[in-house]
Structure formats: structure tokens, C-alpha cells
Amino acid sequence: MAYQNLLSEVKDNILYIVINREKALNALNKETLQELADVIAFAEKNEEVRGVILTGAGEKAFVAGADIKEFSNYNGTQGEELARKGQENVFNAIENSSKLFIAAINGFALGGGLELAMACHIRIAADNAKLGLPEVTLGLIPGYGGTQRLTQLVGKGKAIELITTANAISAVEAEKIGLVNYTVPQADLINKAREILDIVKQRAPLAISAAIQAVNASINTDHGFETEIKAFGKCFETDDFKEGVTAFVEKRPAKFSGK
Ligand code: HXC
């Protein structure tokens, strides 16, 4: 895959995506969003990919937000379209992916950048990272799901505080409030993400996918328990379930086919 604004590589069943606009602190312009939509769809289709690590180029920024220069003249309709299209094709597509996405937050994660990290299933932050939703400093509010996902992750009180003050917080503070799973030195960031995916890679692919969908249903629908029951039942119809149980009885590691 050749992209203008992304680097991507599949290695040992992990898709590495680097947002590569370092001079603009990896801000999300239209082309980058389209390329992200394409690479997310690739990850979804490609059986070799068992998990995704998403990061930003350089050591300063994960993503400093939507590209402000691009939407400075937008009207209401264009603004709504920007948010809707981005949410559908990128942010929701990551959240609903059957592959586990880990955001490796290597610096500033602001506005659409933090929203991108929050759409991922797991977040790991480098100790120099700064996280925030500064949209109200521009006369805007978050539009890529930030008001919803921040509230889901840290609760209403902290979410309102962070959104209305526009204050950015440190990685350590973000870990304290549950916004990131781990804080690690910058040099260990990708290794920590890989360590998690190396474990997940050994698990049954269809069960991982079902688990993600069921957890998502707990916050995005009013029928989370029913979703879990149905998904649980479906797992019994997979080869992976038979293999998992057989491997347990035979006291050997399971070799899952994802079927
Ligand atoms: C476009 C950006 C950018 C952005 C940085 N740059 N953030 N360009 N969009 N979001 C560009 C700068 O213009 C500059 O390029 C270069 O990156 C380096 O940035 P500096 O500001 O010179 O760096 P520094 O002084 O170190 O400050 C870093 C920073 C600051 C604190 C991260 O850049 C910043 O505040 N950026 C904006 C953050 C923000 O408000 N994000 C939310 C956007 S709204 P030039 O060529 O000028 O030197 C959003 C809405 C999402 O995300 C929802 C949409 C539906």
C-alpha cells in the first residue's frame, strides 16, 4: 500500500500505521482521513492482520487535531458533513473493527487526535504526551465523537471539565483518570503496544471480534446483554471453539484458524 500521508506495514500479523505529516504535527487533513479510512478497511479484510498499532511520526505529536487551516471557512452544513463522514469512515470504523486497535500516543493528542486515540480499543501514552480537547478555544466543540467517548472513558464530571477548560493533561494524569491504559517512556511505546498484541494474537480471532462488539454494545446500544448472549452462542459454532477445547484437553497450545 502506498499512501501520501501514512506509513503502513504488516509485520508478524500486526499492522503498523504511522500518520506521517510531521511538519503539521500530523494534523488530520482530508487526504489523511481518506487514507485512514482505506487502511482501516484493509485491516478489516486482511486475515493476516490480527491487530493494529496506530501512532504519529516523530517524537512531538501523535495528532494535533483536525487540520484547522482546511476548515477555517466552513459553513454549518460543511462542518456537519466533516464530522459525520469522519465519524462514519474513520472513528466508528476503528471502534467497530474486529481487529484490536492500539493507539500509541507519542506526543500531543489534541482535538481530533485525542478523538482518534479514544476510538481505538486501547491507549498507551509516552511520558511526554499531552492530551486534550481544545476545540472551545476555536469556538467549536469536539466533532469526531469526543464528547461521547471522553464521557464514556472518564465520566461526565471530568469530561465536562476537560472539554470546557480545553486544558491538556499529562500522560500520568490521563492514566490516573482512566483515559490511557499505560504510560511508558517514549522509547518503550511501540514495544508495550506490541507486547499486548503478541498476547491477543494467540487468542481466538472470532472470539476477539465478538468480545469487541459485545463491549461496544454496552455503551452504544440499549441491548448490550442480549448482544453478549447472542455472540456467546455463536462462538459455539466456530472451529476455534472446538480447537480451544480440544487443545485444553490435550494439554497443548491452541492453534486457531479464525473460522
Ligand atoms: C493544522 C497544525 C495543527 C492543526 C499544528 N499545526 N496543529 N496545522 N491543524 N491542528 C501546524 C502549525 O500550524 C505549524 O505549522 C506546525 O504544525 C507546528 O506547530 P506549532 O504551533 O508551531 O508548534 P508548537 O508551538 O510547538 O505548538 C504545538 C501545539 C499547537 C500546542 C500542538 O500547534 C496547537 O495548539 N495546535 C492546534 C491544536 C488544536 O487546536 N487542535 C484541535 C483542532 S480542532 P506552520 O506551517 O504554521 O509553522 C479539531 C476538531 C476535530 O481537532 C473535529 C472535527 C469534526
Image (cartoon, rainbow, N blue to C red):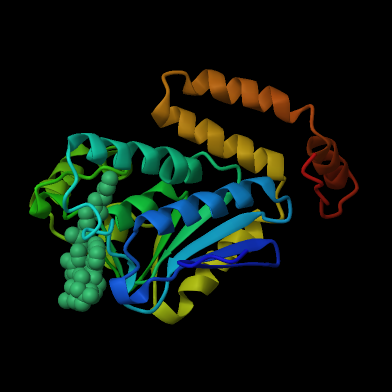
Q: Is residue 107 above or below residue 258?
A: below
Q: Is residue 114 above or below residue 148?
A: below
Ligand 1 falls in quadrant = bottom left
Q: Please state the horizontal and vertical placement of residue 19, each as a whole percent of the image.
A: 44, 66
Number of callouts: 0
Q: Please state the horizontal and vertical placement of residue 226, each as a whole percent of the image.
A: 54, 18
Nearest the camera: 198 or 65?
A: 65
Left or right of residue 164, residue 51 in this image: right
Left or right of residue 236, residue 157 in this image: left
Nearest the camera: 100 or 1?
A: 1
Quarter holding residue 51 = bottom right
Left or right of residue 244, residue 197 in this image: left
Quarter holding residue 209 = top right
Residue at the spot 71% in from the left edge and 25% down from the top edge: 234
Q: Is residue 38 above or below residue 27?
A: above
Whether residue 225 is visible to the viewer of this picture, yes or no, is yes
Residue at the spot 86% in from the left edge and 51% down from the top edge: 251
Quadrant (top left, top right, bottom left, bottom right) of the N terminus: bottom right
Q: Please state the horizontal and vertical placement of residue 229, each as a whole percent of the image.
A: 60, 21
Quadrant (top left, top right, bottom left, bottom right) of the C terminus: top right
Whether residue 145 is visible to the viewer of this picture, yes or no, is no
Residue at the spot 51% in from the left edge and 69% down from the top edge: 192
Q: Please state the horizontal and vertical placement of residue 246, each as a whole percent of the image.
A: 88, 41
Left or right of residue 29, residue 135 in this image: left
Quarter holding residue 199 = bottom right
Nearest the camera: 56 or 179?
A: 56
